[in-house]
Amino acid sequence: MLRQGDANNYEMSDREESDEEEEEEEDEEAASERAKKRVPDWAHGPELAAAIHKQYGGEAIDPDLVFPEVHTCDLEAIFATKKKRFTKRTSSGNWHTDRLRDSERAQYRKDAGYTS
């Protein structure tokens, strides 16, 4: 369920159980509130085109230069708890064969325009 916060933000909460008619009414109210929300200048017209060009055009920065490659995730660190199942790797938790190959990385860099 979306609740209006201030003019430019929305507060989000879990959708509670309700009957269909009540849900439709809430959906209509939420849609009406979204329609009143001001769209920032950068999100349309020439400002949007400039932002897209900066992100994807000639000035684009290769994200691999900014973000390191991650081969696994530490579930114990994420959930701040130790569980045996976090360290046990069954076939569904063994992602080694799904890693990107060097040829796939090279093709991505070429397709994205990060190599000459």
Image (cartoon, grey):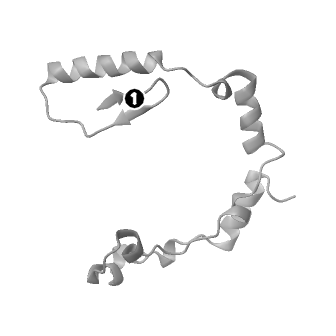
Residue 83: x %, y % from top left: 28, 80
**Left or right, 113 with reference to 35:** right
Q: How crowded is mark 1: few (under 14 residues within 10 Å), some or many (20 or more)?
A: few
Quarter of the image where one finds residue 65:
bottom right
Quarter of the image where one finds residue 81:
bottom left
Could you tell me the amino acid type at mark 1? Gly
**Left or right, 33 with reference to 43:** left
Residue 94: x %, y % from top left: 41, 78
Residue 101 visible in the displayed image: yes
Residue positioned 72% across, 36% down in the render: 52
Q: Mark 1 points at which residue?
A: 5
Residue 89 visible in the displayed image: no
Quarter of the image where one finds residue 78:
bottom left
Residue positioned 74% across, 57% down in the render: 62
Location of the C terminus by quadrant is bottom right
Location of the N terminus by quadrant is top left
Residue positioned 64% across, 69% down in the render: 68
